[in-house]
Amino acid sequence: MHLAEYIFLHHGYITTSTIMASRELLLKNPFTEGLPKHQDWDWIFKADFFCKAQAVFLDIPLTIYRTQYLGRSMSVSQRNTWKFSHDWISKYKPYLSQEVIMSFDRGQVIPSLLNDHNFSKYSKYKFIRYILLDFSYKERFIEWKNVIIPFIYRQLKGRYGKK
């Protein structure tokens, strides 16, 4: 199983502070400079796909992660960068399954898009349809078309009123 599947399909949790790697791997696979978001996942994907690094999981906690703290709203993970996220995951399409990309879009792209006040309801709906039409798995698309799109539309309608 690839680490992307562990993270996005099995609710795995990996952050930069939980990664321990050899100096050799860090020199061979440096963090990508200038990414406004997803630095940890980017490094993990490159280590997995290009360096064939093996992951070892420990059953004991070695890090403490706070979800509530002063300044959390300024955190990189809290920025509304849905367009960047969509473009970022797209560059890994050749290495990821459709399910992983859909899970990423569902968890990272679509919620941020729904919270973007610079887009009209119609523009949001249109972009979400564009994301979903990108998938070739017909069964998954039918599920999204019949279940997810109406749900998102109801959310948008409730959030912005009837228009």
Image (spheres, helix red, strand yellow):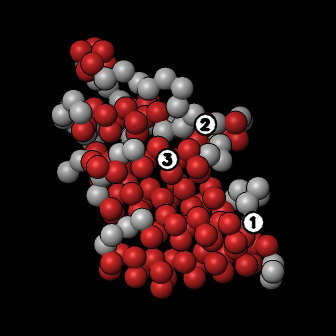
- Residue on which the image places disc 2: 76
Q: Which residue is drawn at 47% across and 43% down?
A: 88
Q: What element carries label 2?
A: helix
Q: Which residue is drawn at 63% across and 71% down?
A: 125
Q: What element carries label 1?
A: loop
Q: Which of 118 and 157 is in front in this view?
A: 118
Which numbered marker is on residue 19? none
Q: Is mark 3 on a helix, strand or loop?
A: helix
Q: Residues within 10 Å of mark 2 (few under 14, many from 20)?
A: some
Position of the C terminus, as image quadrant, is bottom right
Q: What residue type is labelled 2?
A: Val
Specify which label sits upstream in the sequence, 3 or 1: 3
**2 vs 1, front mark:** 1
The percent coordinates of residue 13 (x first, y second) are 40, 46
Is residue 12 visible from the viewing direction of this image? no
Work out which residue is located at the far bottom of the displayed protein and give it. Answer: 146
Left or right of 128? Residue 62 is: left
Q: What residue type is labelled 1?
A: Ser
- Residue on which the image places disc 3: 87
Q: Which of 96 and 159 is in front in this view?
A: 96
- Residue on which the image places disc 1: 120
Q: How crowded is mark 3: few (under 14 residues within 10 Å), some or many (20 or more)?
A: few
Q: Which residue is drawn at 66% across and 81% down?
A: 154
Q: Residues within 10 Å of mark 1 (few under 14, many from 20)?
A: few
Q: Nearer the viewer, residue 44 or 66?
A: 44
Left or right of 70? Residue 29 is: left
Specify which label sits upstream in the sequence, 2 or 1: 2
